[in-house]
Image: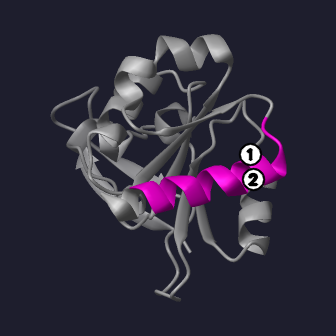
Amino acid sequence: MSRFVQIRSLFSRERPASLIHLEEWPEQSGKARVLIENPERADLWAHADLLRKEGYDVAMCGGPDAELEHTVCPLLAEGQCPLVDGADVVVSTTQLTDSREILATLSARKSPALVVEGTSSELERDRDVTGDAVQLKLPVLPRQLVDAVERARSARASD
């Protein structure tokens, strides 16, 4: 089921752009929700499958790199995103074109908790904007991902 949200285009003030979420959150099931930013050049579908098997509700978005015509990331454009707002944890990546802006926006929020994956050099480069995010060095093993999500949730719950 797709959700369409009209927002002002960053490219033209007169023309609205459609933002397409390929997934929306299911009805509240009592499970923790994890949003995975999955830029097209990353293959994070296995992450989603693993987390679903571990009992999480999982949604994915393309982040600001989504190659959909006239798509604008609502988090960058408006400072709000329905998928981020409904998540308990966001798994983001330093591989996004606008990663520093996205990571700074996410880490400044009280909720959701943040897990950031990247190479050692990317994580070091973005350390000033990731705040207290749990960091994962690529390549990420399945157990590392599950542990990182749990650590992020626990740390945020104790705040």
Q: Residue at x 26, y 30 (%)?
A: 10
Residue named by callout 1: 44
Residue 9 picture quarter: top left
Question: Residue 84's spot in the image, x, y percent?
Answer: 39, 56
Image vertical order of residue 14 relative to residue 97, above or below: below
Image vertical order of residue 47 relative to residue 102, above or below: below
Image vertical order of residue 131 relative to residue 16, above or below: above
Q: Residue at x 27, y 53 (%)?
A: 110
Residue named by callout 2: 47
Q: Residue at x 16, y 32 (%)?
A: 13
Q: Is residue 60 visible?
A: no
Q: Is residue 138 visible?
A: yes
The part of the chain drawn in magenta is: 140-155
Identify the coloring: one colour
Residue closer to the observer: 19 or 78: 78
Name, please, the residue furthest toward the left: 14
Quadrant housing the C terminus: bottom left
Residue closer to the observer: 148 or 81: 148
Q: Amino acid at mark 1?
A: Leu
Q: Is residue 146 magenta?
A: yes
